[in-house]
Image (spheres, rainbow, N blue to C red):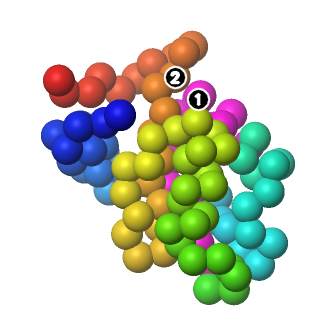
Amino acid sequence: MLTGKQKRFLRSKAHHLTPIFQVGKGGVNENMIKQIADVLEARELIKVSILQNCDEDRDTVAEQLSRGAKAELVQVIGNTIVLYKESRENKQIVLPR
């Protein structure tokens, strides 16, 4: 689990990122979760945006994505979810203790 300090640090890092995934009418599916897990391995920190036509509420989507990709949910703000997962191969982000 992330501490409050670590979440603040990750939020500041994620601020300038643009969302690279969008969850729309189809909601969350296995293929999307696999792609997000792969991208998290490469980048560690990503944003996912939830489109207006998404049938599920944002907290449900955030929960499904973080659990499916085994990632930490950093933040849900507006229709944007910030996810973090420490990379095994190419670690870039050093979290404060």
Rendering coords of residue 40 (x, y %): 57, 36
Q: What residue is at 37 percent from the left and 49 percent from the top?
A: 74
On screen, residue 15 versus residue 79, left or right, reads: left
Q: What residue is at 70 percent from the left and 82 percent from the top?
A: 55
Confirm whether the magenta stretch covers residue 53.
no
Give the Cα separation between the discs numbered 1 and 2: 7 Å
Residue closer to the observer: 13 or 29 = 29
Which residue is label 1 attached to? 42
Q: Is residue 5 visible?
A: yes
Q: What is the three-letter code of the residue carrying label 1?
A: Ala
Q: Is residue 18 visible?
A: no
Q: Find the magenta span and give its range.
A: 35-51
Asked which quadrant contains residue 1, the reply is: top left
SS of the residue under disc 1:
helix
Q: What residue is at 61 percent from the left and 52 percent from the top?
A: 65
Which residue is label 2 attached to? 87
